[in-house]
Image (tube, rainbow, N blue to C red):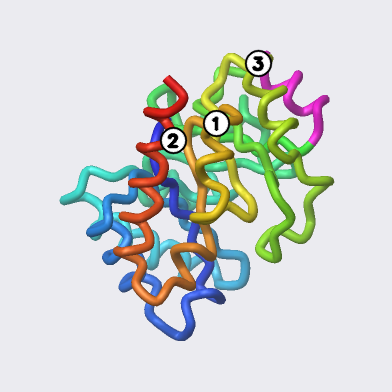
Amino acid sequence: MRGIYLVTDRSLCRGRPLAQIIRQALEGGVDYVQLREKEISSRDFIDETREIKKILEPYHIPLIINDRVDVALVCGAAGVHLGQSDMSYSAARKKLGEKAIIGLSVETWQEVEEAEKLNISYIAASPVFVTPTKTDTKEPWGLEGLKKIKQFSRHPIVAIGGINETNISDVIGAGADCIAVVSAICAADNPEIAVRSLKNLMDMAIEANK
């Protein structure tokens, strides 16, 4: 895992269609898209997933579904992102197969240690900083916490939570392999330009930390 990982939140899109935000993010060069829906019916979620999957296919960008293994399975998504209270990794892997992307959020050190035993695709350090888009999580990891995870874990690290242009370089320097972004893209005046800027800053930080 490496690059900019868009996690969608329709409430931050300022009334614009989610598909429009995603199309613009794709033009900016986003590397992964996670579809996160908490408040729509399963039928609507499936319809939306199929629509977004078609948008992503020409760009060869994987579609990852938040929480809902059933939706990912029905729609042929590339994988799922699991929280600690969602379906277990082993059950999800059994349903989706060995090629599926399966990510797992880690909010405590115990969860980092437990994740080390699993053949997950990545761990998501959540949240790195305080953020209004993640209100049900534990204390933020901060940059020192991120460094500690990097030194310990064998998995790629996706950093999420309060990351934007002002701190992305520090987050990369602390060991993040991939940056997950919600509001900095969904709420941006121009999501395409926002992604391009984030990718440029990320590339510079990677080069500086070689």
What segment is highlighted magenta in the picture? 108-117
Res 173 label? 1
**Which image quarter holds the N terminus?**
top left
Give the SS element for disc 1.
helix
The part of the image, by quadrant, that contains residue 116 is top right
Q: Nearer the viewer, residue 154 or 177?
A: 177
The amino acid beneath tag 1 is Gly
**Which image quarter holds the C terminus?**
top left
Give yes or no for contact between labels 1 and 2 (Cβ–Cβ under 8 Å).
yes
Furthest residue to the bottom?
15
The mark that comes first in sequence, 1 or 2, is 1
The mark that comes first in sequence, 3 or 2, is 3
- Compared to residue 64, the image places residue 125 above or below, namely above
Res 205 label? 2
Q: CA distance from mark 3 to mark 2?
A: 18 Å
Q: Which residue is mark 3?
A: 151
x and y percentages locating residue 49 in the rendered image: 39, 60
The rendered magenta stretch, by its main secondary structure, is classed as helix
From the viewer's perspective, tell me whether residue 89 is left or right of residue 71. Answer: right
The part of the image, by quadrant, that contains residue 196 is bottom left
Q: Nearer the viewer, residue 143 or 61?
A: 143
